[in-house]
Amino acid sequence: MRAAERPDGKTGGEKLSGTRNFMREAGRVPGFTWFDRVHAYVYGRWTYLYIAIGVGEHPIARLLGPIVRAVQPRRPAEVPPRGTTADSYHGKVLPLETARRLVRVMEPVTVADLERVIPYPVARALILRQPDHLVALECPCRTARPDPCLPLDVCLVVGEPFASFVVEHHPRRSRWITPEQAEAILEAEHRRGHVQHAFFKDAMLGRFYAICNCCPCCCGAMQAQRSGTPMLASSGFRAVLEAAECAACEACADACPFGAIEMRGGQPYPADEVCMGCGVCVTRCPTGALRLAEAPERGVPLDLETILAGQPRPSDPSSEAP
């Protein structure tokens, strides 16, 4: 995969100082320990090994867990403790239009705590630096599988310091893209029946860093969700059936990536407790019988327009990176 030209005119083959910029910004994160910095570097530098181990497709997967737990230092009292995997690494389901908005952002965004949107104790900040710096990365979950879904380059890394770090260390697996190209990837993956997730991780400076286009057969987070580890938060919407329009074709049930739709008497019934509000069934329905409705009991949507409405303009010094 060849790297395209960056928004600032540089190319992916030039020295980008991605590691230096990443570590400099890591040093500004409160409570980020030396172990966190090592973890961050390992995760970003050896992403494919890290994910292959995480999804159990690597032979040393069972060996590293006890070693990491043994060497991990005690965290400062003011830093929330880690619990399950989902506490520190998780995704927020995004309907297609919500995902589109995240790759259209052209100005800095800083929201330090999205507690009502991202219901996890850590890694829930939305901080975008140079959000027009977008990278398409070969999906680590797909590449770890023996027979992956295609195409591979469907993970969208958003903003700095993440985009430059990824291109610096994975030049053959990544490429710079424009917002228009990012939207095209999102739309194509949605048509394939795949789900958009905004991913947050403690190692990625405790914040949003990528939009993944996930298929249930390859995605480690979706498989963990099915196994009882709640790595995914609902979009804040749920599928609702307008029964009069239903053609009983079962297209929605076949397409649902979460297996949330059951057919009864020729009619689909979305299970509220399983439906994640991705909107795949809505797109697949040929008669328009399904729609997404807000579901406050399932969470608050990651509505970027609402978030941006409360942010200072880029000309305000308080909106710039420290």
Image (cartoon, grey):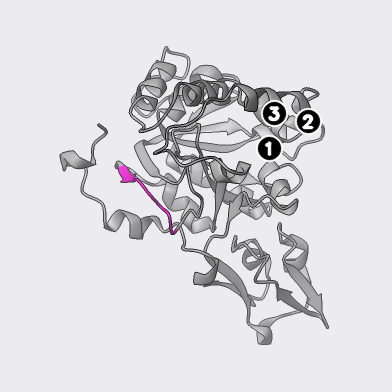
Based on the picture, tell me whether residue 112 belongs to the magenta stretch.
Answer: yes
- Compared to residue 280, the image places residue 22 above or below, namely above
Earlier sequence position, callout 2 versus callout 3: 2
Residue appearing at x 46%, y 19% in the figure: 12
- Farthest residue in the top direction? 15
At label 3, which amino acid type do we have?
A: Gly
N-terminal-most mark, 2 or 1: 2
In this figure, which residue is indicated by the disc labeled 2? Answer: 57
Q: Is residue 249 visible?
A: no
Which residue is disc 1 drawn over? 151
Contact (Cβ within 8 Å) of mark 2 with mark 3: no
**Residue 154 makes an appearance in the image:** yes
Image coordinates of residue 252 in percent, x first then y, are 72, 67
Query: Would residue 6 be found to the left or right of residue 90 on screen?
Result: left
The image quarter containing residue 273 is bottom right
Neighbor class of circle 2 (other Cα within 10 Å; few <14, some 14-19, many 20+) is some
Query: What is the C-alpha distance between the residues marked 3 and 1?
Result: 31 Å
- Picture residue at 71% right of the left edge, 61% below the top: 256
Outermost residue on the left side: it is 316
Q: Report the side of 315 relative to 274 (left or right).
A: left
Q: How far is the residue under mark 2 from the one under mark 1?
A: 20 Å
Residue where numbered disc 3 is placed: 65
Residue 299 horizontal side relative to residue 23, left or right? right
- Coordinates of residue 213 in the picture (x, y in percent): 61, 45
Q: Which residues are magenta?
A: 109-116
Element at label 3? helix
